[in-house]
């Protein structure tokens, strides 16, 4: 029998190229929880185009045939809920789709800090000519928090421009030709103290929630800059604002936040030396088509009984590296 796929969150704005999946499966589309709940009892597969727990959880108990959920995102913290975690349903993410775009975005932010681009644009608006020295990235130390595929992509680009790269992950392991040292959670304070720049691409789990708080920012060098492209919940935003206002770190660039959209009254908008962007680090043109391509390949594998790619460890909350 042909599998039945529910495309959750893709009715009004259908994923580009999704009609190609009709060669392998029957597709149905729904946008709100009630519609999804009606369709789940007959579903074998869900493409979570909007990977949100509130979209799937109401009808999950009746999804007796459901075997696989494909998330259209790298992070799955917003999708996982206890019943799903405890079930036999396989969850896969958009593993690899966002690696290149997010690494390039991270490098752009590091360069923006190094060449003082925000100040240059500010002076341009004021029509002021103010020559000054800038920095280079070559020879500086970068700490990448997270060594999944995105973290590795960030590390490779940083190494290519001559940076020394350190990393912290769920467990320590030997360095290689890209990353000099991979420390475990207990090594974070020491590694923060060695870094000129910190790029956080950690997933949001119980272990990483609020990881970057007052102690972490106190461990950083006063001239260091912090970049968060992972999940907003991994950062204590009040502690970050304090660190910026008190000059305990030199700058921060944030693309993800505990609450999105970022409220207009958030102090992050006006924090000194802060760059705020609206969760766009992975949104390079063509990302939706790339997610559909990944889903089509996994759907082919599913229909053929082959192993799927990007399988999430639901208890860890991410795809284990290695």
Image: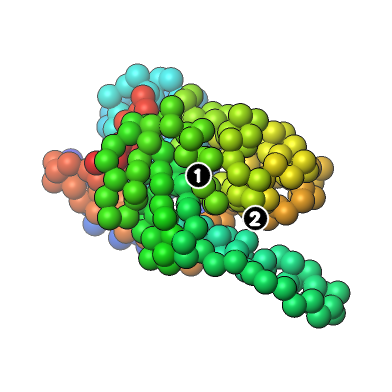
How many numbered marks are there? Answer: 2
Q: Which residue is mark 1?
A: 194
- The location of residue 247, given as percent across then percent down, is 74, 45
Q: Is residue 3 left or right of residue 180?
A: left
Residue at 56 percent across and 56 percent down: it is 280
Give the spatial CA distance, label 1 vs label 2: 27 Å
For label 2, the SS is loop
Q: Quadrant of the C terminus?
A: top left
Residue 160's place in the image compared with 64, above or below, is: below
Residue closest to the eye, 60 or 248 = 248
- The location of residue 144, given as percent across then percent down, is 45, 47
Q: Can residue 53 be seen at all in this image of the molecule?
A: no
Residue closest to the eye, 106 or 51 = 106
Residue 26's place in the image compared with 45, above or below, is: below
Q: Is residue 172 left or right of residue 228?
A: left
Residue at 46 percent across and 61 percent down: it is 139
Q: Which residue is mark 2?
A: 277
- The location of residue 254, given as percent across then percent down, is 62, 49
Residue closest to the eye, 2 or 79 = 79
Q: Is residue 128 left or right of residue 115?
A: right
Q: Quadrant of the N terminus?
A: top left
For label 1, the SS is helix
**Disc sitting over residue 73 in the figure:** none
Q: Can residue 274 be seen at all in this image of the molecule?
A: yes
Give the image quarter of residue 22.
bottom left
Residue closest to the eye, 196 or 47 = 196
- The location of residue 47, given as percent across then percent down, is 38, 44
Residue 130's place in the image compared with 231, above or below, is: below
Q: Nearer the viewer, mark 1 or mark 2?
A: 1
Residue at 41 percent across and 47 percent down: it is 166
Which is more N-terminal, label 2 or label 1?
1
Residue 148's place in the image compared with 185, above or below, is: below
């Amino acid at each position: 029998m042909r599998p039945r796929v529910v495309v959750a969150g893709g009715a009004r704005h259908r994923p580009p190229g999704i009609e190609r999946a009709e060669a392998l499966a029957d597709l149905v589309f729904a946008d709100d929880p009630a519609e999804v709940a009606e369709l789940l009892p007959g579903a074998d597969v869900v493409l979570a185009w909007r990977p949100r727990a509130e979209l799937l959880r109401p009808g999950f108990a009746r999804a007796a045939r459901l075997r696989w959920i494909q998330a259209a995102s790298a992070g799955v913290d917003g999708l996982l809920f206890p019943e799903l975690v405890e079930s036999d349903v396989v969850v896969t993410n958009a593993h690899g789709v966002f690696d290149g775009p997010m690494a390039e975005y991270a490098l752009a932010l590091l360069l923006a800090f190094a060449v003082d681009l925000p100040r240059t644009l500010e002076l341009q608006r004021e029509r002021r000519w103010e020559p000054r020295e800038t920095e280079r990235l070559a020879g500086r130390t970068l700490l990448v928090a997270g060594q999944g595929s995105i973290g590795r992509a960030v590390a490779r680009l940083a190494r290519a421009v001559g940076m020394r790269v350190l990393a912290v992950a769920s467990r320590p392991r030997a360095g290689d030709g890209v990353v000099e040292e991979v420390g475990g959670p207990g090594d974070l304070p020491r590694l923060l103290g060695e870094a000129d720049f910190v790029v956080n691409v950690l997933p949001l789990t119980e272990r990483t929630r609020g990881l970057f708080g007052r102690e972490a920012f106190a461990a950083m060098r006063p001239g260091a800059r912090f970049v968060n492209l992972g999940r907003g919940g991994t950062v204590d935003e009040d502690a970050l604002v304090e660190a910026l206002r008190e000059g305990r770190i030199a700058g921060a660039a944030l693309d993800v936040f505990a609450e999105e959209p970022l409220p207009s009254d958030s102090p992050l908008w006006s924090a000194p030396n802060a760059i705020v962007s609206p969760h766009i680090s992975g949104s390079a043109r063509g990302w939706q088509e790339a997610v559909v391509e990944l889903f089509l390949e996994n759907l082919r594998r599913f229909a053929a009984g082959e192993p799927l790619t990007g399988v999430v460890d639901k208890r860890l909350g991410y795809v284990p590296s290695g």
